[in-house]
Amino acid sequence: MTPIILIPARMAATRLPNKPLADIGGLPMIVRVLRAAEAAGVAPVAVAAGDPEIVEAVTAAGGRAVLTDPALPSGSDRILAALAELDPEGRHDAVINLQGDMPFVQAEVLTATAALLDQGCDIATVVAPEMSPADRANPDVVKAVLSMNESGRAGRALYFTRSTLYGDAPIWRHVGIYGYRRAALEAFNAAPPSPLEKREKLEQLRALELGLSIHAAVVDAAPISVDTPADLEAARKVANS
């Protein structure tokens, strides 16, 4: 496949306003995400920005950014709008949606996502092992229920949930990075929120209810995600270490 990596970003974050431009070790966070994605060497990279300030920061750093309608309701809507502008001819038949709040995303996360798309699923994502037993009952930790392949390093997603999972099997924390076949992204965005999506507040359940296949690769650790002021301070310590 011929993927492109798109990074949706907007300034209006409830818990950490203006976070794409938050300084982390002398660079705006969105620039760190962009450079990490470029360094992975998986595909061309661009930012799908909801605000002109983000475009200015990205282009000043030598990156590529597209200004999208700030009223778009979700990151997947934003990347689809950016894709239409960047690639109207359809040269890229797959899109990797990388969150704009993962300043130290590992190359293995992106290469694993791209590899799953090459193997034929509609949507690819990644999971990581639970960080502690408390993850099992934490509704803020999204758990992926997978039918694993023989290698134990990838599997087909059967469900995603915020609910407690029981038993002795591993618990897989879902990492919010998605690779879409272009047709799957278009089908997903054209559909209204599904009943399970609204119940769990997890949009990936819309894809499963549409009959789209989601496969997940196991990575050793989830990328650092910056959602709160405390997360930002932790990321700054990593950048300065």
Image (cartoon, rainbow, N blue to C red):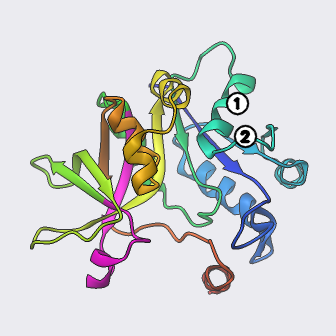
The reply to whether discs 2 and 1 touch (Cβ–Cβ < 8 Å) is yes
- Visible in this render: residue 218? no
Marker disc for residue 188: none
Q: Residue at x 59, y 51 (%)?
A: 37
Q: Looking at the image, is 29 positioned above or below residue 26?
A: above
Q: Nearer the viewer, residue 1 or 51?
A: 51
Is residue 92 positioned above or below 73 on the image?
A: above
Residue 29, position in %: x, y? 72, 66
Q: What is the magenta range? A: 123-143
Q: Residue furthest top?
A: 89
Viewport quadrant of the C terminus? bottom right
Task: Report which quarter residue 66 is drawn in.
Answer: top right
Give the x, y percent position of residue 45.
65, 41
Return the residue at label 2.
72
Task: Pick the residue in front: 17 or 111.
Answer: 17
Residue drawn at 9 percent across, 73 percent down? 168
Residue 1 on the magenta span: no
* Side (left or right) of 87 relative to 58: left
C-alpha span from label 2 to label 1: 9 Å
Residue 116: percent from left, percent from top: 33, 38
- Please tell me whether mark 2 or mark 1 is closer to you in this view: 2
- Image quadrant for the N terminus? top left
Of the numbered discs 2 and 1, the one sitting upstream in the chain is 2
Q: Tag 1, which secondary structure?
A: helix
Identify the mark at residue 81; answer none if there is no mark.
1
Q: What amino acid is found at the position of numbered circle 1 in the picture?
A: Ala
Left or right, 216 with reference to 69: left
